[in-house]
Amino acid sequence: MATLGTDVQTPRLAAARIGSDVGLLLAKLHAAGSVLNNKALADFGLRERSFSILTLACSGLEPTQRELADFLSLDPSQVVTLVDDLERRGLVERAQGKQDRRAKIIVSTAEGRKMHTKARASMDAAELTQLAGLSDDESQELKRLLRKALWGAAE
């Protein structure tokens, strides 16, 4: 399988009708991107899922574990395991929710924010590699269209 970027050649089998199926195209883009992302995160002891939790913990949106599970399409037990690991490492903490005092929110620690800044730079570089075949405008349009397809928001 070719790596992503400008050196990608269209595989022979892409000529089949399935080569235009949105599900296949998204799955292949995600699979190839996951490899790049996990390589980019390896130096930080993170993987895509843990980075996603850390990113949302750093967002200031104060997500609950349920919201994290729903947004990331993960089983709640997976989120608990990921948060437990990040909490053990001192990168996030569970805090009392401001809107619903019974719900625990996930927030980053100062150490978590520092690590996130470094890991985010590495992830941004991986994304540039993944989308190297697209112009900056095309990359932004792809993201806009994906958000619109998922949430109906044209933003």
Image: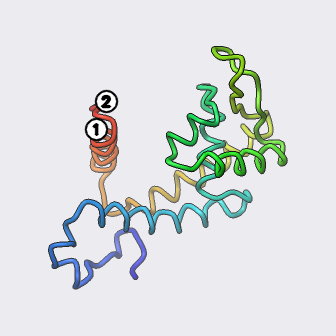
Q: Position of residue 123 (x, y in %)?
A: 56, 53
Task: Residue 9: name its quadrant.
Answer: bottom left
Task: Residue 66: name its quadrant.
Answer: top right
Q: Position of residue 112 (x, y in %)?
A: 75, 40
Is residue 51 placed above or below 66 in the rendered structure? below
At a point 47% along the width and 56% down the height, the residue shown is 127
Secondary structure of residue under mark 2: loop
Q: Quadrant of the C terminus?
A: top left
At a point 34% along the width and 70% down the height, the residue shown is 6
Q: Along the horizontal axis of the image, is 113 left or right of 38?
A: right
Q: Along the horizontal axis of the image, is 71 left or right of 96?
A: left
Q: Along the horizontal axis of the image, is 19 left or right of 63?
A: left
At a point 72% along the width and 51% down the height, the residue shown is 81
Residue sitting nearer the eye, 101 or 154: 101
Is there CB contact under 8 Å for labels 1 and 2?
Answer: yes
Residue sitting nearer the eye, 1 or 22: 22
**Residue corresponding to mark 2:** 155
Q: CA distance from mark 1 to mark 2?
A: 8 Å
Sequence-first tag of 1 and 2 = 1
At a point 40% along the width and 82% down the height, the residue shown is 1
Is residue 52 placed above or below 108 in the rendered structure? below
Residue type pointed to by label 1: Lys
**Residue corresponding to mark 1:** 148
Residue type pointed to by label 2: Glu
